[in-house]
Amino acid sequence: MSSLSKVVASLKERFSEVAESEFRGLTRVVVPQSQCFEALTCLKGEFGFDMLVDLTCVDYLNFRDATDRFGLVYLLASMEDNLRLTVRVMLNEPDLTVPSVVPLWEGANWMEREVWDMFGILFEGHPDLRRILLPEEFEAHPLRKDYPLQGRGERHNFPVLTRGEA
Amino acid sequence: MAIELPENVVISKLDSLGSWCRKNSLWPMPFATACCGIELMATGASRHDLARFGAEVFRFSPRQCDLMIVAGRVAMKMLPVLQRIWQQMHEPKWCISMGACASTGGVFDTYAVVQGIDRFIPVDMYVPGCPPRPEQLIQAIIDLQDKIQAEGTIGGREFNTFARQQRKRALMELPIIRTPQIVLPNRQGTN
């Protein structure tokens, strides 16, 4: 059995730049972009975080006091020890690339496709990085804060059927 | 009267007879995508009993239908499907846009939702409401029946008028701005 504080302490020991914070009883660590795959591999392999509960992203554009543009969020859980840990990776343009965690958690496949679809973050080594929700020919990443709510004309870009054509 | 007719003989126009047959046997195609679909089902069920107007035979194959009822919001990704189903229906065919979302996009004024199906397919009758009561849908069907009886022809000439051929609403509100495409690295199946 290992407690969460022990996990975070040994993670900090191994990866010097890891920052820890707590909010409403949930522990959060911020991992640098270059070390995120190693840190997640370590969390899964050595500390038993065998479940990736969710993988999502936040766009901090125009957010008060924000220094980074995107925050990639991995919600991990350890079934064995009943622990939960939030891992964040802060990303900035133009380098929006992180290694895919599909080799670690198979369930990350569709989650990474969704994050790619909505935020345009590239997951290196993903087996099938296609859009998952929006149509293939869609060209933007609409959950970014600089994307207009009503779109850039995508919803008008279809052939119109009249009575004669039907 | 110059000619004596037997009592069981009625003289009418062929167009009128055809329209009378058509209007009393509308077979709806339920294109139900949201909560309007629940009201559509209620309309077909026993309390409201759409069978009184001859329109109770919901068919899930567009080839057997002549009235498409679009009930609910239509996502942009869904629109090609809607258009294909409309094209698969045989003439003569009519379309009812049921509810605020199908008619105008409703509260979903976002990049992903079609702002009124009449921008992309022809619509004969609009039903307001969010969702409309079954009575409103029944009224729309009755109005459509009146419309079919009033202007219907055997050969479908009423569909060839200029007003019916026209696109209902202009699509001029936003120009299409292309954003540069990000090229996917290590995507399988290419190169």
Image (cartoon, rainbow, N blue to C red):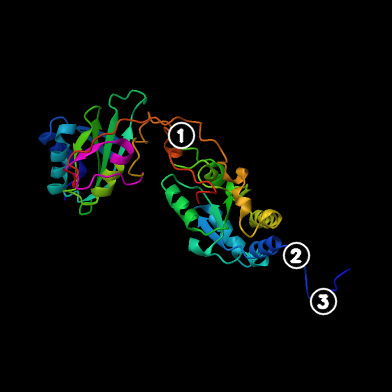
Residue A45 percent across, percent down from the top left:
13, 48
- Counting from the top left corner in percent of width and height, residue B87 is at 48, 54
Specify few, some or many for label 2: CA neighbours under 10 Å numbering under 14, 14-19, or 20 or more.
few
Q: Where is residue A96 drawn, in percent x and y?
A: 23, 32
From this viewpoint, is residue A54 visible? no
Question: Residue B6: which disc?
Answer: 3
Left or right, residue B89 beside residue B135: left
Kind of residue indicated by mark 1 = Gln
Name the residue nearer the viewer: A133 or A17.
Answer: A133
User: From mark 2 to mark 1, how far is it between C-alphas?
Assistant: 53 Å
Find out whether the residues at labels 3 and 2 contact each other: C-beta distance under 8 Å: no
- Point out which mark residue B12 bears: 2
- What stretch of residues is rendered in magenta? A116-134
Alpha-carbon span between mark 3 and mark 2: 15 Å
Which quarter shows the C terminus of chain B? top left
| Subunit of label 2 | B
Same chain under badges 2 and 1? The reply is no
Crowd rating for badge 3 (residues with CA inside 10 Å; few <14, some 14–19, many 20+): few
- The chain carrying label 3 is B
In the rendered structure, which amino acid carries the disc numbered 3? Pro
Q: Does the CB distance between marks 1 and 3 fall below 8 Å?
A: no
Mark 3 secondary-structure assignment: loop
Check disc 2 and give the amino acid type. Ser
**Residue A12: which numbered mark, if any?**
none
- Mark 2: secondary structure: loop
Q: Chain of mark 1?
A: A
Marks 3 and 2 on same chain: yes
State the mark number for residue A150: 1
State the residue lying farthest toward the left.
A14
